[in-house]
Amino acid sequence: MEPFTTTFSVKEKDIDTLNHVNNISYLKWVQEVSGAHWYNITTPEIQNQYYWVVLRHEIDYHHPTFLDEEITAVTWIGESEGVKSDRFVHFYCKDKLVSRAKTTWGLIDKSSKKPTKITDEILNILEPFKM
């Protein structure tokens, strides 16, 4: 397994009235990290032919995070079958797991705008990132 990792800092816009990261920011980060990974591992041809839509998010919050803290996001692929693929994203701050998410994505063909079976080419691209 080769997880995709990225690091960023908590910004003012991520903070809620309790002075910690808002739950919605984690959801936004899940989508941003997932998209970054997809665009990092696929070709422009694949990106022009397909896109993913969220079917389900599950997020667990373990510890609060605060303004200017550095967050490391680690993502990998779970089961991918038919039109669906599971993706996991864990968020760490100072080496402590602060939040984790499981998202089920559906593959869409850009021309028909309909769900489409995950191709062998895409499965082969995702394989090194499966856990």
Image (cartoon, rainbow, N blue to C red):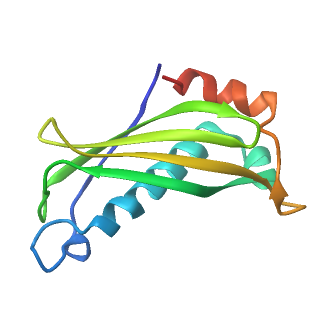
| Residue 90 sits above or below residue 69 on the image | above
Q: Residue furthest right?
A: 112
Residue occupying image coordinates x 51% and y 40%: 87
| Residue 77 sits above or below residue 56 on the image | above
Expressed as whole percent of the image width and height from the top left, the position of residue 24 reads 34, 68
Residue occupying image coordinates x 59% and y 30%: 79
Q: Is residue 1 left or right of residue 107?
A: left
Expressed as whole percent of the image width and height from the top left, the position of residue 99 reads 26, 48
Compare residues 100 and 52 and report the one nearer the observer. Answer: 100
Compare residues 24 and 39 and report the one nearer the observer. Answer: 24
Q: Is residue 121 left or right of residue 69?
A: right
Expressed as whole percent of the image width and height from the top left, the position of residue 83 reads 75, 43
> Where on the picture, by quarter, is residue 96?
top left
Q: Is residue 118 left or right of residue 65?
A: right
> Where on the picture, by quarter, is residue 122?
top right
| Residue 35 sits above or below residue 4 on the image | below
Residue occupying image coordinates x 53% and y 31%: 78
Compare residues 118 and 43 and report the one nearer the observer. Answer: 118
Expressed as whole percent of the image width and height from the top left, the position of residue 46 reads 77, 45
